[in-house]
Image (cartoon, helix red, strand yellow):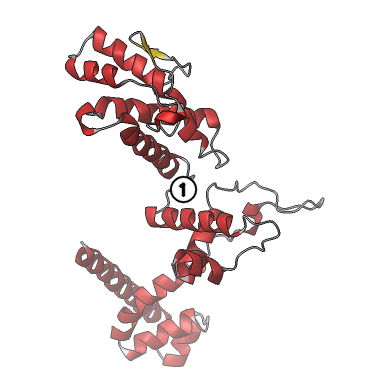
Amino acid sequence: MVIDMSTSRSVNGQNTAHRTASSGRRPHDDAPDTAAAFARLAELGDGPERDAVREELTEAWLPMAHRIASRFRDRGESVEDLRQVAALGLVKAIDRFDPSRGAFESYAVPTITGEIKRHFRDRMWALRVPRRVQELRNKVRVARRELTQSPGSPEPSTSRIAEYTGLTEEEVATGMEALESFSTLSLDAELSSDDDGYSLADTLGAADSAYDVVVDREAAKEGLRRLPERERAILYMRFFEDMTQNRIADRLGISQMHVSRLISRSCARVREEALGQGMRTAFAKE
């Protein structure tokens, strides 16, 4: 939803210019006097008249929303988008405000600020990051900024930030790592400026097919242990010593056909036991 960013200095014909500083009743010059308009809004039911008063209140308080949005500039989001988010927070504050509970500004400021923070938390991360990590990132970022405010201040160490924030060094390290993880890096990003430059994807490993062999061997172990000793010996000679069936037959003093039948029968038995064990494991997990 795009909200008109123009501002209005009057609501229902009232002068909405800020009160003078001497009154001491408003800390900012973008807080118009809209108490009467809010009282009227609370009395109106749904309809065009209420919508008109609501729109006028939104326009009157937009400068304040813009001011709050400006606090979050230079954090990876455009000022225009931040103002849109702040305006949405303002509309929510107007809809929920109860004039009998005090000044609108004291209610609107945390509402708008919370809306902007939720925007950063839920929309700005390229990857979904746990809220706890996001909070650690914010604490570390603020601490680093405050510790380096003085000209010539060195970059604070992990232990210094931990002491300043009351966090553990491990938590600080997590927050500092998150500082560099706000956005993702393309796999096609060049990591070298040389003619023979390579991309991030070139540094990543590929799937190792040997893992499948490990899994298959582990699955077959139990079935191999259950085989008679002679059948285990035949399988070892055939598949580990790479002997032909004729050589195995000569060594054991049996026919080549008998060796072939024993190999087929043994392999089938081991396969059935391995598959059966896999099925039992799957059912146990369910």
Horizontal side of residue 70 vs 25, given as left or right: right
Q: Nearer the viewer, residue 199 or 229?
A: 199
Q: Which residue is found at the position 49% from the left and 60% from the top?
A: 175
Where does residue 102 sit, x and y in percent of width and height? 25, 32
Q: Quadrant of residue 249?
A: bottom left
Where does residue 285 sit, x and y in percent of width and height? 23, 65
Give the tally of numbered discs: 1
The C terminus: image quadrant: bottom left
The N terminus: image quadrant: top left
Residue under circle 1? Answer: 127
Label 1 CA crowd tier, 10 Å (few <14, some 14–19, many 20+): few
Please, what secondary structure does the residue beneath circle 1 have?
loop
Q: Nearer the viewer, residue 161 or 17?
A: 17
Q: Is residue 142 visible?
A: yes
Q: Amino acid at mark 1?
A: Leu
Q: Is residue 261 visible?
A: no
Q: Quadrant of residue 62?
A: top left
Horizontal side of residue 223 vs 140, given as left or right: left
Q: Is residue 215 above or below residue 99?
A: below
Horizontal side of residue 115 vs 35, given as left or right: right
Q: Which residue is found at the position 43% from the left and 19% from the top?
A: 3
Q: Nearer the viewer, residue 234 or 206?
A: 206
Where does residue 72 sit, x and y in percent of width and height? 51, 40
Q: Is residue 25 above or below residue 275?
A: above
Q: Nearer the viewer, residue 215 or 100?
A: 100
